[in-house]
Image (cartoon, helix red, strand yellow):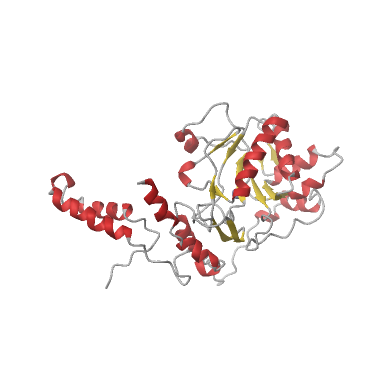
Amino acid sequence: MGLCIPNYIYLPRDFVYILFMLFKPVVPVRRLPLRILLSLLLVFGLTGMVEAKKVSSKTSTPAKELFGHMKVPAQMKPQPIGSYAKGCLAGAERLPANGSSWQAMRLSRNRYWGHPELIAFIEKFARTVTEKDNWPGLLVGDLSQPRGGPMMGDHASHQIGMDVDIWLNPMPNKRLSKRERENISAVSTIKNRREINPKVWTTGHAKILRRAALDKQVARIFINPAIKKEMCKWSKQQKDRSWLRKLRPWYGHHYHFHVRLKCPKGASSCKNQNPPPPGTGCGKELAYWLSDKPYRRTPPKPGEKIKKKRPIRLADLPKRCVAVLNDPGEIKQAAVKR
Ligand SMILES: [Zn+2]
């Protein structure tokens, strides 16, 4: 029986590491004759040069595990493939950790990858809110993984490099260290699920949300129902309130707002979501979100089986995602680094 190495294990580094861990308890490395150690490194170094086995669309491994282990993008023409919650991303671009008016957070998650249009949007939006809305700058949370796709925990969407989470906390007036970017906690902007926290919420928040919603590239923005309520109230005297339509109440989203861009022009593999329903959404829809209904869970009837949701598999995603996953981008990139 041959040794089967799934291609999401990074060769040769991870493999040598695994080997090291296996030997460690038996023979301390320092006492291993140098020759044996060197030959082991050579053998497994060479194994790493042989391209890892391709993943087939038939694999039963959940897609989030396959995509979650990818460290660098597929070196292909940038393209979002599929829909926001069922797709992947070719040719992703990295959001730099620092810009003129933003800082990327939680860098260890490696979710700072997006379609070049999303990266350009973040740069433009950060600059505009700083210049026109007197906002101190943006703290940017998750975009997508290097090849998009489903994630291990947290998000159902963010799969095609067109979604970004932007913190509702303004950027501090200093360059944050790597550690600070991991550890600083966001402050909630709501008091409870019906009211914002007036000690945290400012007109600045309202202005940047409106600015994002007015942008033609933006398809929708997810925010907490209490924030939507505040936005409806704040904009009451304004002539144009059509932008309110794009502010979609959703669970959570009081530490950050989630901006979703429309598919780039000509991106034939990208599937847009239906536009939000007409109107401001400040009437019935908001009333529903402020009621208990969205939070009510109907208990299962006696004898009723609770269906466990099967995780998304590679075969559930557009066919082209198999090629995105199997692109040797990471191996090329690793070779360049050495
Ligand atoms: Zn999000």
* Direction from residue 54 to residue 233 in the image, left or right: right
Image position, residue 179 (x, y; %): 45, 34
Which residue: 33% across, 62% down?
A: 50
* Front residue of 292 and 78: 78
Does 29 appear above or below 206? below
Image position, residue 27 (x, y; %): 15, 50
Question: Would you say residue 233 is visible in this rendering?
Answer: yes
Which residue: 49% across, 65% down?
A: 323
Which residue: 72% across, 51% down?
A: 289
The quadrant the N terminus occupies is bottom left
Question: Would you say residue 254 is visible in this rendering?
Answer: no
Tell me how many marks there are.
Answer: 0
Image position, residue 66 (x, y; %): 45, 60
Q: Residue furthest top?
A: 173
Image position, residue 222 (x, y; %): 67, 48
Q: Quadrant of residue 276?
A: bottom right
* Front residue of 294 and 234: 234
* Direction from residue 334 to residue 43 in the image, left or right: left
Q: Quadrant of residue 30?
A: top left
* Front residue of 90 and 198: 90
